[in-house]
Amino acid sequence: MTDTRGQQPSYESYSGPLPGERTGAQQPGGPYHPPQAYGAPAPGGQAGGGTLGGQTGAGAVRRPRTGARTTPRTRKARLRVAKADPWSVMKVSFLLSIALGICTVVAAAVLWMVMDAMGVFSTVGGTISEATGSNESNGFDLQSFLSLPRVLMFTSVIAVIDVVLMTALATLGAFIYNLSAGFVGGVELTLAEDE
């Protein structure tokens, strides 16, 4: 019999657990896995692709379902014009009427120049002067009556009257709209926005 006292046991050919080491079956909750860094590949999968407790990982990319709706939806809003501010209506109508008056004067001047270049005034004026003339007088002179300064002055007077009337009527219309909106609720508008 060989005396083995004083010799250290050899673990080279031993494949079992070392003394003091806990096996996977002895770990609480199942096999032991070392802690993973955030975003590191999970055991048995890629980074962020594994599941924990049936939930998708934090780094998982959600892909649209097959047949999902990709066309943009149109949002609609139903609004009601409850009140029109008379002061703002008066300012806007005043500026618009001034612009309309300037356009009227310019259009009258351009029209007069075109008609004068075509010889309308001379032809029509000669006919009128022959029809209204006599041996003692030459008749009515249309060209002197419809001269450019006189036409521009007449058009300017019409434009000023137009500015005053449009501003007053628009402001009065705002007051009337506010009164009617108090009874019927105002005009409803449906606005649509494309996403």
Image (tube, helix red, strand yellow):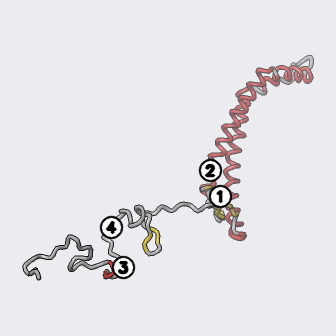
Task: From the viewer's side, name the closer residue of 54 and 123.
Answer: 54
Where does label 4 land, which residue?
36
Calculate the distance from the C-alpha at mark 1 to the C-alpha at mark 2. 26 Å
Query: Residue 42: x percent and y percent?
Result: 38, 66
Q: Amino acid at mark 3?
A: Gly
Quick check: 125 above or below 165? above
Element type where label 2 sits in the image: helix
Give the x, y percent position of residue 28.
33, 82
Q: Which of pointers 2 and 4 lies earlier in the amino acid sequence?
A: 4
In the structure shown, which secondary structural element does the residue marked by tag 4 occupy? loop
Q: Are marks 2 and 4 in contact (CB under 8 Å)?
A: no
Image: 137 above or below 14:
above
Residue name at image x 67 percent, y 45 percent: 163
Q: Residues within 10 Å of mark 2 (few under 14, many from 20)?
A: some
Nearest to viewer (mark 1 / mark 2): 1
Q: Residue at x 65, y 65 (%)?
A: 82
Amino acid type indicated by mark 2 = Val
Number of numbered callouts drawn? 4
User: Disc 4, disc 1: CB below 8 Å?
Assistant: no
Residue underneath mark 2:
92
Quadrant of residue 24 within the rendered picture: bottom left
The part of the image, by quadrant, that contains residue 155 is top right
- Of labels 2 and 3, earlier in sequence is 3
In space, the residues marked 4 and 1 are separated at their CA atoms by 51 Å
Q: Residue furthest top?
A: 135
Mark 4 or 1, which is nearer the eye?
4
Residue tagged 3: 30
Picture quarter with the C terminus: bottom right
According to the picture, the residue beneath numbered tag 1 turns out to be 192
